Image (cartoon, rainbow, N blue to C red):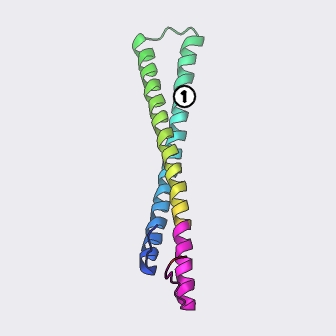
Amino acid sequence: MASLTLDQLEAQIKQCNLNLEGLKNNIQILEDNLSLHKNHERALRQNLSILKDDYIIAMASEFKKIKQDLSIVKMKIKEIEVDLKNGKFFLSKTNKLLVDLKSQYDILVEGQKNKVLTGHFGKE
């Protein structure tokens, strides 16, 4: 990471914290949606099993509609699971970035307190 000023690091840390909160909220929403869709899937499967097990002769359109709804719910569940996985990945990357930024910030603050300039002159 390039050398940044104290103000730049403060701004990036604030932005990173905002991103973290947004990611956490999105992950919570995705987890809630996933739970909702899994409950819906379970209910649709129960409806299908009742129609099959009790030898109820249902109208073909009702049976077909439930099957279609089930396939739509399955697709939504897969999409949400992918989004959730991506969200958690970016959350971890953002957490790591925040730790790195805070570390750089602490180094700069400590350097300002000590008013020590570290220079590298010539060859090592």
In the image, 63 versus 82, the foreground residue is: 82
Q: Which residues are magenta?
A: 100-122
Which SS does the magenta portion mostly show? helix
The residue under the point 52% across, 44% down is 85
Where in the figure is residue 5, as x and y percent of width and height?
A: 43, 79
Secondary structure of the residue carrying tag 1 is helix
Magenta stretch encompasses residue 18: no
Relative to 51, residue 75 above or below: below
Magenta stretch encompasses residue 107: yes
The residue under the point 42% across, 80% down is 7
In the image, 10 versus 21, the foreground residue is: 10
In the image, 65 versus 7, the foreground residue is: 7
The residue under the point 47% across, 65% down is 16
Q: Which residue is mark 1?
A: 43
Where in the figure is residue 21, as x and y percent of width and height?
A: 49, 61
**Can you say which quadrant of the picture contains the C terminus?**
bottom right
